[in-house]
Amino acid sequence: MLEPKPTPPPPPPPKGLRAEFRDFLSKYKVMGMAVAFILGLYLGALVQALVNDIIMPIIQYAMPNTSWQNISIGPFQVGAFAGAVLTFIIVAFVIFLIVKMSARANIQ
């Protein structure tokens, strides 16, 4: 009867601060997370500019004599909230598209 091969022992921990740091970077893919975080920040800023500088002025054009940030319903300032919701929806849709394309390209 065949017996399963014993699992090899784990590699020894790296010695020295520099080696430990390099192991940490590669094990937790910190550089990839940092790049994704930075790109996410700038994607948010880009979408914020799209909403504030292109989409909302069109809405303001449709509603002359008022600024979209100052639109209110009773005591509630809903104009700025509507801009934030629109920004969120656009960012969520872009992230959805990125995830969908990476799944189709078999990128994990």
Image (cartoon, rainbow, N blue to C red):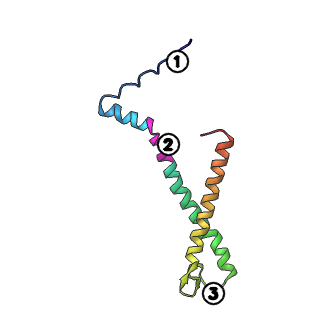
Q: What is the number of the mark on residue 61? A: none
Q: Position of residue 27 (x, y in %)?
A: 44, 36
x then y, percent, for residue 105: 67, 40
SS at mark 2? helix
x then y, percent, for residue 14: 34, 28
**Separation of marks 1 and 3 at Cα, in angstroms:** 79 Å
Count up the numbered dots. 3
Task: Give the residues in magenta.
Answer: 27-35
51 versus 42 height, above or below: below
Q: Residue furthest left?
A: 16
Q: Amino acid at mark 2?
A: Gly
Mark 1 closeness class: few <14, some 14–19, many ≥20 residues within 10 Å: few
Q: Is residue 55 magenta?
A: no
Task: Provide the major secondary structure of the magenta segment.
Answer: helix
Name which of mark 1 and mark 3 comes first in the sequence. 1
- Identify whether 53 is placed above or below 68: above
Residue 40 percent coordinates (x, y): 53, 54
Q: Which mark is residue 65?
A: 3
- Left or right: residue 15 versus residue 8 is left
Give the foreground label among 1 and 3.
1
Q: CA distance from mark 2 to mark 3?
A: 47 Å
> Which residue does the image show at 48% across and 45% down from the upper left?
33
Report the amino acid beneath label 3. Asn
Q: What kind of element bears circle 3?
A: loop
Mark identifier at residue 4: 1
Q: Which residue is mark 2?
A: 32
Tell me which residue sits at (50%, 17%) in the image. Answer: 5
Relative to 31, 61 lies left or right? right
Residue at image point 33% right, 33% down: 18
Badge 3 local density, few (<14 within 10 Å), some, or many (20+)?
few
